[in-house]
């Protein structure tokens, strides 16, 4: 029988703080989230992920010159199945840009133009959050209770 861990309700706030600290972005760090839930995979998430990895390798010298620390992570359902494959670029300081209906060609552009070049691709953005600017999310009228963190965790 597998071992289980018992967590008390009172421990959850400190566990949450530890997780937030571990996932916090450092000043020169960028995170690229790729939607690889069921709908993301069905929409072509595998080839999109490979295109991102290939373009990061091709842009290696520019990434090194800028001193960027880039991490690619997968995430589960974001609740926007019709917009899959979703790719989100997160920068330290809170800027987040989410692209929808990403195919391998767009994935390569996201890496070269947004991640390395710092210029988001406006025509493909479905959501963006920048500190100090008003936020409007596609699912703002939805009330997520059980899936409160969908699209942020895997």
Image (cartoon, helix red, strand yellow):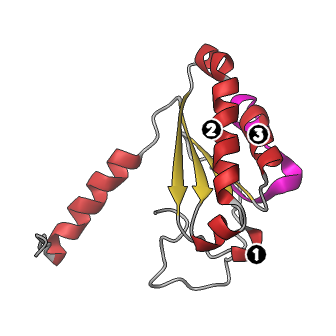
Q: Which mark is residue 108?
A: 3
Other-residue count near label 3 (Cα within 10 Å), few / some / many at <14 / 14–19 / ≥20:
many
Whether pointer 1 and pointer 3 mark residues with C-beta atoms closer than 8 Å, the reply is no
Label 1, label 2: how far apart the Cα atoms are: 24 Å
For discs 1 and 2, the disc positioned in front in the rendered view: 2
Q: Gap between marks 1 and 3, in whole Å?
A: 21 Å
Give residue 33's position: percent from left, percent from top: 58, 52
Tell me: 154 left or right of 98. left
Q: Which residues are magenta?
A: 114-129
Q: Identify residue for label 1.
A: 82
Find out whether residue 116 is within the magenta segment: yes
Residue at point 48%, 70% (across, down):
149
| Left or right side of 150 for 4 | left
- Give SS at disc 3: helix
Residue 40: % across, % down: 65, 66
- Residue extending farthest to the right is 123
117 displayed left or right of 73: right
The dot on residue 53 is 2
- Say which label, 3 or 2, has the lower sequence index: 2
Image position, residue 104 (x, y; %): 77, 48
Check disc 2: other Cα within 10 Å, few if <14, some if 14-19, many if 20+.
some
Q: Earlier in the sequence, mark 1 or mark 2?
A: 2
């Amino acid at each position: 029988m597998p071992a289980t861990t018992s967590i008390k309700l009172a421990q959850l706030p400190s566990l949450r703080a530890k997780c937030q600290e571990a996932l916090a972005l450092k000043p020169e760090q960028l995170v690229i989230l790729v939607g690889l839930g069921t709908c993301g995979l069905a929409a072509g998430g595998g080839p999109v992920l490979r295109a991102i990895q290939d373009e990061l390798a091709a842009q290696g010298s520019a990434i090194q010159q800028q001193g960027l620390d880039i991490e690619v992570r997968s995430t589960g359902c974001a609740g926007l199945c019709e917009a899959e494959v979703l790719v989100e670029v997160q920068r330290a300081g809170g800027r987040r840009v989410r692209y929808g209906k990403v195919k391998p060609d767009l994935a390569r552009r996201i890496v070269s133009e947004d991640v390395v070049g710092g210029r988001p691709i406006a025509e493909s953005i479905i959501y963006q959050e920048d500190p100090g600017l008003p936020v409007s999310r596609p699912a703002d009228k939805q009330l997520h209770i059980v899936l409160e963190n969908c699209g942020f965790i895997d």
